[in-house]
Image (tube, grey):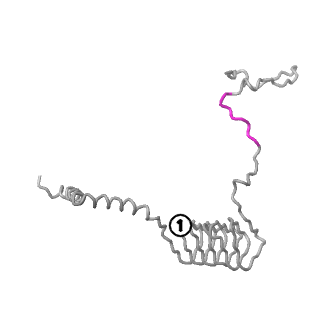
Amino acid sequence: MWKARPEDNRPMTLSPSQPAQPASTPVAASAPSNATPPKEPARSMPETRADVGHIGKSVVIRGELTGNEDLYLDGEIEGNINLRDHKLVIGPNGKIKATITARDVVVHGRVEGNLTASDRVELKRNCTLIGDVNTQRIVIEDGAFFKGAIDIKEHKEPKTEMRKPMASAAAAGSGSGSMASGATLSASAGSQGSFLDPK
């Protein structure tokens, strides 16, 4: 592999009598082996980006708003918003008087109404929320105004997987009879008896 010489990296100085000549350095020979290829121009990739609806700040809606995609809402809405399995972002110009149901809700603007999010609610710095929140997780930044109640839903794990090993262990223990229960008793007695035994 060819290595770049120190002379090749020096800036070229011209004397007043010399005409300007373009420097002819071999590009392939002086390029290090770990050089990355030139980047291609950025392409928009709609196939990898999720669909996001956008409602601008000049739009006013009265009634029910439902959808099957994420939504950025910066306008005014009175009524109900139902995006059950999707994310709702309320922009800084958003003025909402509605009951909201979504997977995730991020509030930058003003909301009057109850919020139900199956996963997460974020109240950003300059937002105002007057209403109750029902969610699994909530983030309230410093400077957010919130008046209402919060009901945190418990995240429930499926318990069927935990019961199967216990059932098989119980079946194995019942086959060996008193030996399995004796092993359990002796282990617990040994661990507790160490403090009580005289030395």
Q: Secondary structure at mark 1?
A: strand
Q: Is residue 6 above or below residue 88?
A: above
Tell me where residue 64 sits by quadrant: bottom right
**Mark 1 surroundings: few (<14), some (14-19) or many (≥20) residues within 10 A:** some
Tell me where residue 14 sits by quadrant: top right
Amino acid type shown at disc 1: Arg
Q: Residue furthest front?
A: 175
Residue 108 in the image: state x and y as whole percent: 65, 67
Tell me where residue 169 sits by quadrant: bottom left
173 on left or right of 5: left
144 on left or right of 91: left
Q: Which residue is mark 1?
A: 137
Q: Is residue 148 above or below residue 93?
A: below
The residue shown at (84%, 25%) is 22
Residue 147 in the image: state x and y as whole percent: 57, 77
Q: Give the quarter of the figure containing the N terminus.
A: top right
Instruction: Give the extent of the magenta segment.
Output: 32-40
**Which of these two is toward me, 131 or 48?**
48
